[in-house]
């Protein structure tokens, strides 16, 4: 039986096992996929043990950056961005790559029929998720990447990374309070991507003044359940989608990297939706 896993801290909430096990099953591969809770100070030890036992694994918060020095090789774009979420164990040599950008890109194509090439994307938020995806968009042909974030320096750092990877890509950044700039950045975007963690808790404020959101503009919410921001966008006639598609497609790409086979996306999607339904019931 091949062994796979997802590591993080905390990890209890992860729905990757249900999704990946459905994928392996549909491919006829006998595999186990576990959730491993790895505290930050035990990461190096865990990686050493996993090197001997696991064919591959996913990496989530807070290890996406800190695991990099523990690997043997890293895919060049992921190395420049400084974030990996997929480890492939090739006979004891660990190779890291990131499928987060691919996952978001594929979700946007599926939801809004929009490609990266020549299009403009406004990210709200500059945490790990925006950092892993916005520079990937620049590197893969986006015309412009803008980032709106409470901490301006983090938004600027993402823009710098995007320009390093793609000097032709236009960038811009501001804080949510810079109303004129926010209005301009949202207006010029083809898609707006909500990438803050606001909306995970019921009392969270909206990430920006909703009146600044142009009516009818496609909005992607990275959180994979309906949030107040998503509902407010829908009320402004914005075509919208939650983060389930991104989660699905980043996982499907990981499975392809481990197995060399095309991912059975529909089987994985069905398992993910069922796991989400159970998780949603559990938190209500
Ligand atoms: P981080 O903790 O790294 O970043 C959090 C972001 O939210 C930062 O931009 C932070 O701003 C902002 N933020 C947090 N609290 C506030 C606040 N009170 N006011 C204003 N801004 C705030 O999280 P991640 O980037 O890892 O994840 C972001 C979201 O994306 C999460 O909800 C996660 O669930 C989701 N996600 C979904 C994925 C999917 O596959 N669908 C994949 C990865 C993540 P500041 O920089 O100023 O602190």
Image (cartoon, rainbow, N blue to C red):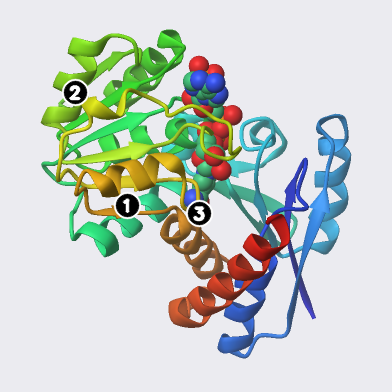
Q: Secondary structure at mark 3?
A: loop
Give whichever of discs 3 and 1 has the lower sequence position: 1
Q: Secondary structure at mark 1?
A: helix
Left/right placement of residue 100 relative to residue 51 reads: left
Quarter holding the N terminus is bottom right
Give whichever of discs 1 and 2 has the lower sequence position: 1
In the rendered view, tell whether residue 134 sits above or below residue 161: below
Disc 1, disc 2: CB below 8 Å? no
Q: Residue at x 53, y 62 (%)?
A: 251
Left/right placement of residue 265 relative to residue 48 reads: left
Q: Quadrant of residue 249?
A: bottom left
In three-dimensional space, the C-alpha distance between marks 3 and 2, rounded to whole angstroms, equals: 25 Å
In the rendered view, tell whether residue 281 sits above or below residue 159: below
In three-dimensional space, the C-alpha distance between marks 1 and 2, rounded to whole angstroms, equals: 20 Å
Whether disc 1's CB lies below 8 Å from ligand 1 is answered no
Give whichever of discs 3 and 2 has the lower sequence position: 2
Q: Nearer the viewer, residue 260 or 153?
A: 153
Residue depth check, mark 3 versus mark 2: number of the one nearer the observer:
3
Numbered circle sitting on residue 105: 1
Whether disc 3's CB lies below 8 Å from ligand 1 is answered no
Q: Nearer the viewer, residue 97 or 190?
A: 190
The residue indicated by pointer 2 is 185
How many residues crowd mark 3 within 10 Å: few (<14), some (14–19), many (20+)?
A: some
Disc 3, disc 2: CB below 8 Å? no
Numbered circle sitting on residue 95: none
Disc 3, disc 1: CB below 8 Å? no
Residue depth check, mark 3 versus mark 1: number of the one nearer the observer:
3
Whether disc 2's CB lies below 8 Å from ligand 1 is answered no
**Residue 203: image location, x then y, percent:** 58, 32
The residue indicated by pointer 3 is 225
In the rendered view, tell whether residue 55 sits above or below residue 238: below
């Amino acid at each position: 039986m091949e062994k796979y896993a997802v590591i993080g801290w905390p990890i209890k909430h992860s729905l990757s096992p249900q999704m990946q096990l459905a994928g392996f099953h549909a491919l006829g591969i006998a595999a186990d996929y576990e959730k491993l809770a790895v505290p930050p100070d035990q990461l190096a030890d865990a990686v050493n043990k996993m090197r001997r036992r696991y064919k591959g694994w996913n990496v989530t918060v807070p290890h996406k950056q800190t695991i990099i020095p523990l690997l043997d090789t890293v895919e060049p774009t992921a190395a420049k961005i400084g974030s990996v979420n997929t480890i492939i164990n090739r006979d004891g040599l660990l190779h890291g790559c990131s499928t987060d950008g691919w996952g978001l890109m594929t979700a946007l194509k599926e939801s809004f029929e929009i490609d990266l090439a020549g299009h403009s994307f406004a990210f709200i938020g500059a945490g790990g998720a925006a950092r892993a995806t916005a520079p990937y968009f620049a590197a893969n042909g986006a015309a412009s990447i803008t980032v709106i974030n409470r901490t301006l320096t983090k938004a600027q750092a993402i823009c710098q990374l995007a320009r390093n990877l793609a000097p032709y890509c236009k960038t811009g950044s501001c804080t949510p309070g810079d109303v004129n700039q926010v209005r301009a950045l949202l207006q010029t975007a083809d898609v707006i991507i909500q990438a803050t963690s606001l909306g995970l808790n019921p009392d969270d404020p909206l990430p920006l003044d909703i009146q600044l959101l142009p009516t009818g503009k496609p909005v992607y919410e990275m959180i994979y359940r309906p949030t107040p921001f998503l509902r407010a966008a829908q009320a402004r006639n914005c075509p919208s989608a939650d983060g389930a598609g991104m989660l699905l497609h980043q996982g499907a790409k990981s499975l392809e990297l481990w197995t060399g086979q095309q991912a059975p996306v529909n089987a994985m999607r069905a398992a993910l939706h069922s796991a989400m339904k159970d998780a949603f019931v559990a938190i209500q």
